[in-house]
Amino acid sequence: RQNATFLILCRNSDVFALLDTLQNLEDRHNHQFHYDYTFLNDVPFDPEVIHLISSYIPQGKLNFGVIPSEHWSYPPHIDVARAQHIHLQSAHIPYGDSESYRHMCRFFSGFFYRHPLVAQYRYYWRLEPGVKYYCNIDQDLFAYMRENKKTYGFTVSLFEYLDTIPTLWDTVKAYMHEFAPRAELLGLVQNDDQWQSYNLCHFWSNFEIADLSLFHSPEYQHFFEYLDASGGFYYERWGDAPVHTMAIVLFLQKSDIHWFHDFGYYHPPFTQCPLNPAVFVDKKCTCDPDEDFTYGFLSCTPHFLEVM
């Protein structure tokens, strides 16, 4: 077994959606491997929630933790009144008027890997309440990551809403100009035009399997602090998914990335479903291949595969 955990950020009110997801993942995968689960919340978990979750997972270690308030609040350099005024003006974009969503995006960009319950592991698999796996996953994916020297695994990629990140790309370009990281994967996100603009593509981070050494690296830490200082998490609505994607572009190589495409994944509103009939039957999938998002017009995966 690898030194790895499933990582779930959830509220007490998410418990029934979470139980559905846990039962699904145990049935489809983890009953064979008994990997640990790490549950984080910005407030303490209710004892009855801990009891319920524990009864659904008979084997494997369960960690329940609270996020430090300084990792889930406005940093000192943010003008809170200005930020809150912007949130009121941003109701037209997804989660645009949400303060807690911004705290969450900043937490998953710069702090999740520092939590002591997470930092003890080498790998994490991010899981969200309400997601579903449609196929049997008989392979130990953490072992696959280690044996094949992979750093980041994804299943869905898509375009970001421009209104949530109007200055993110300019900030990243300024960082590249100043610090000149390797940036071998620039083609994933940069258009081939005279402005070298951002194509809005990103890895959907509600599912990701990654080696935490990427985030613990001084390069990543420096990059996050540079982004954080700009205020974009609060004055705009930068998501952790494009931030992770930019870090992958700046610091990883093609061979570090893996596309997991054969286990059928659903996070509202998108489904990734195996299109190979033999794989579909072999893994006892139950999704509708016609609903597969991979080659839809909002998907970036064909472009990513071409670049990689």
Image (tube, rainbow, N blue to C red):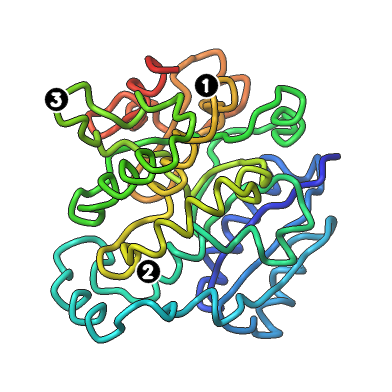
Residue 102 badge: 2
Left or right: residue 53 versus residue 61 is: left
Category of crowding for the residue at label 2, using alpha-carbon neighbours closer than 10 angstroms: few (below 14), some (14–19), many (at least 20): many
Q: CA distance from mark 1 to mark 3?
A: 25 Å
Q: CA distance from mark 1 to mark 2?
A: 30 Å
> Which mark is nearer the camera, 1 or 2?
1
* Quadrant of the rendering where the N terminus is positioned: top right
> Which mark is nearer the camera, 1 or 3?
3
Q: Which residue is mark 3?
A: 194
Earlier in the chain: of badge 1 and badge 2, it is 2
Residue 244 drawn above or below residue 156: below
Category of crowding for the residue at label 1, using alpha-carbon neighbours closer than 10 angstroms: few (below 14), some (14–19), many (at least 20): few
Q: Secondary structure at mark 2?
A: helix
Residue 103 drawn above or below residue 212: below
Name the residue at 13% across, 74% down: 89
Three-letter amino acid code at disc 2? Arg
Residue 18 badge: none
Left or right: residue 200 versus residue 246 is: left
Q: Secondary structure at mark 1?
A: helix
Name the residue at 25% across, 53% down: 165
Q: Which residue is mark 1?
A: 254
